[in-house]
Image: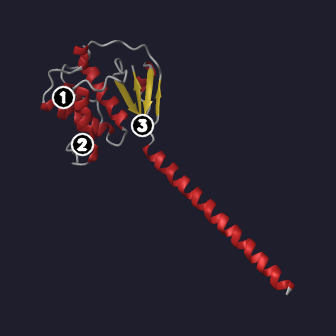
Amino acid sequence: MKTFIETTIALMAFLVFVCIGFVVGQNWSSETIVEKERSVTHTHIHMNVSRPRKKTNSEKRYVNYNVQDLDCLSRNIYFEAGNQSSIGKLAVGLVVMNRVASERYPNTICEVVNQKSQFSWVDDGKSDVPKDDRAWKTSQKLAGDILEGRAEFINFDDVMHYHADYVSPGWSKRMQQVAQIDQHIFYE
């Protein structure tokens, strides 16, 4: 009888530990899944704070844009940052707009985007036709937001260069890094 009672107590203790392990395991598993989901959608942004420049309302909108401008800006955002966060896509689009506003670059969006050796996707020999997917629709929407002046919450006024974080071009050593958003490093 003593052996039966000891065996029953041991079995009950074992079941209690299994139940506790099951509950703890489920919590750990769901926390791990949540962390994995967060890491997939988490945007890494590192910015240096610079002095903001006040813009007038007329500067916030690219008033004279047309369908071709919208398409060129959308394609540049899509091919340069299609796999990045929305803020990363906006940053790439704002670099194009800063170049259009600069005297050192061409005066139109399409001329800036298609300028030789400026954006990697333009001369890479691959198709320049975007897939009709979510990234393309997002790129089009964000390009429209930029052209309508709805992206001025990002202070990128003097940012005209960026590169992927896995390369280190020589020109980057002569410029001031102002932000890293997703996989792009931005410079003034």
The percent position of residue 99, horizontal first and vertical second, equals 27, 21
Amino acid type, mark 3: Gln
- The answer, for residue 122, to whether it is visible in the render is no
- The answer, for residue 21, to whether it is visible in the render is yes
Q: Secondary structure at mark 1?
A: helix
Mark toward the start of the polypeptide (1 vs 2): 1
Horizontal side of residue 127 vs 162, given as left or right: left
Q: Secondary structure at mark 2?
A: helix
The percent position of residue 15, horizontal first and vertical second, equals 69, 72
How many other residues sit within 10 Å of disc 3, few (<14), some (14-19) or many (≥20)? some
Q: Quadrant of residue 27?
A: bottom right
As measured in the structure, the alpha-carbon distance from the residue carrying label 1 to the one carrying label 2 is: 19 Å
As measured in the structure, the alpha-carbon distance from the residue carrying label 3 to the one carrying label 1 is: 24 Å
Seen at 35% across and 43% down, the residue is 83
Seen at 22% across and 26% down, the residue is 147
Please give the label number shown on residue 120.
none
Q: Which residue is mark 1?
A: 110
Q: Which residue is mark 2?
A: 137
Seen at 17% across and 29% down, the residue is 69
In depth, the one of 174 and 110 nearer the eye is: 110
Q: Quadrant of the C terminus?
A: top left
